[in-house]
Amino acid sequence: MIVDAETLELSNAIEGLLGALREISVEGHVQEELMESVCEIATTPCANVREAGLQLRSLRRIVQSVAADRGLAIGSAGTHPFAMWEDQRIVSRPRYRDLVAGLQFVARQEIIFGIHVHVGLDDPDKAIHVANGMRVHIPLLLALSANSPFWRGDQTGLDSTRTPIFRAFPRVGIPPRYDDWNDYAQRIEFMTSCKVIRDYTYLWWDVRPHPRLGTVEIRVMDSQTRVEHTLSLAAMVQAMVKELAEHYESGQPLSSYPYEMLDENKWLAARHGLDGSLVDLPNAGRVLVPDLTRRLIERLHPHAEELGAAEELEGIEDLLENGNGASRQAVVFAANHDLREVVHEIVTATVPEPAETGTE
């Protein structure tokens, strides 16, 4: 989020930032999104999570430096605690103007911020298998990443208010299960030939194959204020994908679970975050989110070690011990009931000090 450095209100300033950044050489990408108060940063394809971390930290520092020169600051969370969508301008790009023309209010009120993690795969049928398998992990990733307890100046009672806001969009949430790549391709072709979508990127599922990039993309998570939490979640996602890729290579079929229970778990995660429990679908019982997470981390740890991401995966423990972003925002708010203080804390924690990363 781009905010005024003094008032901490969202600022429709992306074009000025992008203009200034064109004069600076950066590794990675800084670009616009739907609204002028949103700045999207993205790494290039990285060999491992550590490399992604170096890029992300550098990108946040560079964007913050350019923003500061213009009386602005950047902050990362799932929502801005007191912003009004009515005050936000749509970016003047054909895709976004067409999006608003098609979706109207649904698009205009979407002032939310998320993380997308792409993991490269080498086979289209494997990608479908992984996307199908990731559906069961979506609620847990949301519970860990929930970082949007405030909306339009109100404490909503949800850890991830971003989730129901985005749910107003079509073609979102837990995706359908596809038989294989041909099934996926035929069903997408049916939608495009009927002209209900322009291409597959208009499917905003929580997890989706991204054929143009050769990845599976996981999209359910709220933006993280702290870079180390972003990297821990990325490490967890990468280990999950590796486990499912090996499951496909072994020829094993995936277990099948009712869609309504996958969706119910997602609601429980958005509502309660780390303080709730999810339905352990294989055993049809409720399990506390921290217990379920630690059980899964133990299973994923060998995969993370092979990927060189064991240290980052261990950072999930900080979320379990000290709270996700939503609970940390709530602690700041409880002191003085001052949402500007909450935004100030978000801005302060968003850009890491150089000392955090050691030598780069």
Image (spheres, grey):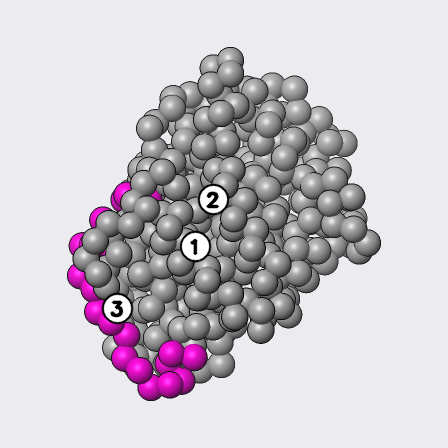
Q: Is residue 239 above or below residue 22?
A: below
Q: Which picture quadrant has residue 314? A: bottom right
Between circles 3 and 1, the one closer to the viewer is: 1
Residue at point 36%, 64% (across, down): 134
How many numbered discs, if any?
Answer: 3
Q: Is residue 181 above or below residue 298?
A: below
Q: Residues within 10 Å of mark 1 (few under 14, many from 20)?
A: some
The residue labelled by disc 3 is 177
Q: Main secondary structure of the magenta part?
A: helix
Residue at point 30%, 53% (across, down): 173
Pointer 3 or 2: first along the chain: 3
Q: Which picture quadrant has residue 261? A: bottom left
Q: Are marks 2 and 1 in contact (CB under 8 Å)?
A: yes
Highlighted range, magenta: 246-269
Q: Name the element at disc 1.
A: helix
Label 2, label 1: how far apart the Cα atoms are:
9 Å
Residue 154 percent across, percent down from the top left: 38, 22
Residue at point 66%, 52% (across, down): 56
In this rendered view, identify the residue nearer to me: 177 or 333: 333
Query: Label 2 is placed on what type of residue?
Result: Leu
Q: Name the element at disc 3.
A: loop
Label 3, label 2: how far apart the Cα atoms are:
30 Å
